[in-house]
Amino acid sequence: MNPKLLPLLAFISVTFFTQAADQKSQRPNIVFIMADDHAAHAISAYGSKVNKTPNIDRIGKEGMRFSNCFVVNSICTPSRAAILTGKYSHINGVPVFNRFDGSQWTVAKDLQKAGYHTGMIGKWHLQSDPTGFDYWNILPGQGKYHDPSFIEMGKTNKFPGGYATDLIADFAINFMEKRPKDQPFFLMCHHKAPHRGWEPDAKHARQFENAEIPEPATFNDDYKNRAAAATEATMRIDRDLTPNDVKFTPPPGLSPAELKHWKYERYMRDYLACIASVDDNVGRVLDYLEKNDLSKNTIVIYTSDQGFFLGDHNWFDKRFMYEESLRMPFLIRYPEKIKAGKVNDAMILNVDFAPTFLEYAGLTAPKEVQGRSIAPLLRGEKPKDWRTSMYYRYYHYPADHRVQPHYGVRNERYKLIFYNRINEWELFDLQKDPHELKSVYADPKYASVQKKMLAELNRLRADLNDKDQFADIQK
Ligand code: CA
C-alpha cells in the first residue's frame, strides 16, 4: 500500500467510527406521557367545548396530532398491556383486570437491551412488578390522589400531603435529572388522573366552580334502536353516580332533569379540575426538556389509556366500542423528524406504539407484534397498505358497570358490533349517525354494507388469531 494513503485511511476510519457513534448517541429519547381516562373531547386541541389544555395542545402544535387513534380494548389494565406488548388482549393474556405476565416480551425490554435507560413512573396497574425498567416508581393498584404511597423498586414510600399528579411529574423530572447522560432514555410517565374518584388538588379544585359546562348532544339518549347492552349498562349520570362521586349534597327541590344536570356539572367540574393539574404538569416536563436542551432530540407523546364518556349517552366511564370510549388522544412531538402543526387522520391503534418506539430506536419489532410502526405517517407518508379498518374486543362483565362483552370492526365510515353473550348486533353509519344513536343492522338498505363489514370482521379475527380464547370470561 502506498504509505501516503495511510493518513487518509486513518482519517476515513476515524470519521466512520465517529459517525457511527454519533448515530448511536443521537437515538432519540422517548417521553411517553399517558393519562388515565382522559377523553380526547376534553382536550382543546381536539376541539373541546368544556376546557382548555394549553400544555397538551403545545405537543400537537409543535408536532402532529392524530384524530383517529383507537384503543383495542377500552379499559385501563388491558390497554396498558397492549401498549407494552404491541399485542391484543387475547395474545398478551390481559383481557380484564388480571395479572400481567412480566416474563413476556415488552417494548421496554428491547429498548433496555439496546442501551436505553428505561423508567416507569406512576400508574402501572398490572399487578406484577414492572420488568424491563432500570427504574420504576409506581402507585399500588389504582393508587390514591391525595397522600399517596408509591412503590419504588419494591419499597413502599408514603407521601403525606402530596398529590399524585404533581408527584408523578416530580419523579419523572427526577428520573431525567439523574439519568446516565451517555445513554438515551425511555420514560413512561403514567398519570392516575383523571380516573374516577375525580379528586382535584386545592390549586384547581375551584377552577370550574362557576363554569356552566354544556351538556353533550346525546345527554338524553333513550337507548332505543340499539342492542340491549346500552340499556343494561350501569354507568348513567342520573342513576349511577354515587354520593362519593358527586361529593356535595344537591340543593333541595330539583326536578329529575335538574338533578341530572346538577350531577353532570359536579362530575365534570372535578374531572376537568383533575385534567387542569395534568396539563400543568405536562408543562413542567416540557419546560424541563427545554431548559436542559433536550427538546430537539426527544420524542414526547401525550395520550390516555382509552377514551371516556363525558355525559355522552348519559354515561361516565368507557368500555363500549362507541366513539367517545374508543378514541384515544394522541399528540406527538419530535422536532428533528416531525413537521410542526400537522393533523393526521390515519387510523392508528395503541398496539402501534411499541413498534413505533422500536423503529425510532433503530430496532425492529418481533414478528409476533400485531401493531405497526406509525413512523411513516410521522414522516408525512401514507403507505398504500395502511389499515382502513380496526378490530376491537371487550371482555369485562358484569363488573363494574354491566357492559356486555362485545367485539367489532370499525372502518372509516361504518362500525359493526357483536355482543357475543346476548347474541345481538349493531351496525352504525358514522357519516349519517355520528353519535351512534340508531343501529341499522338488518336494515335492507344496508344489506351489502353489513355483509362487507361482517367479512372484514372475520378477516381481522383470523388475521389477529382471535380464536375466542376468553369468550366466556366473567369477572
Ligand atoms: Ca383508564
Image (cartoon, helix red, strand yellow):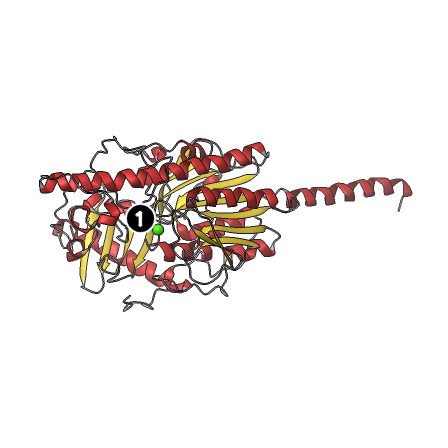
Q: Residue at x 50, y 38 (%)?
A: 285
Percent of width and height locating residue 182: 66, 45
The quarter of the image holding the C terminus is bottom left
Graded by Cα atoms within 10 Å as few (under 14), some (14 to 19) or many (20 or more), the crowding at tag 1 reads some
Q: Which residue is drawn at 56% across and 46% down?
A: 175
Secondary structure at badge 1 equals loop
Q: In which quarter of the image is residue 247?
A: top left
Q: Which amino acid does label 1 sit on?
A: Gly
Q: In which quarter of the image is residue 452?
A: bottom left
Percent of width and height locating residue 468: 31, 67
Percent of width and height locating residue 4: 89, 40
Residue nearer the viewer, 472 or 54: 54
Q: Quadrant of residue 64?
A: top left
Question: Is residue 293 shown above or below 384?
Answer: above
The residue pinned by badge 1 equals 197
Furthest-front residue in view? 160
**How many discs mark residues in the rendered view?**
1
Percent of width and height locating residue 47: 31, 33
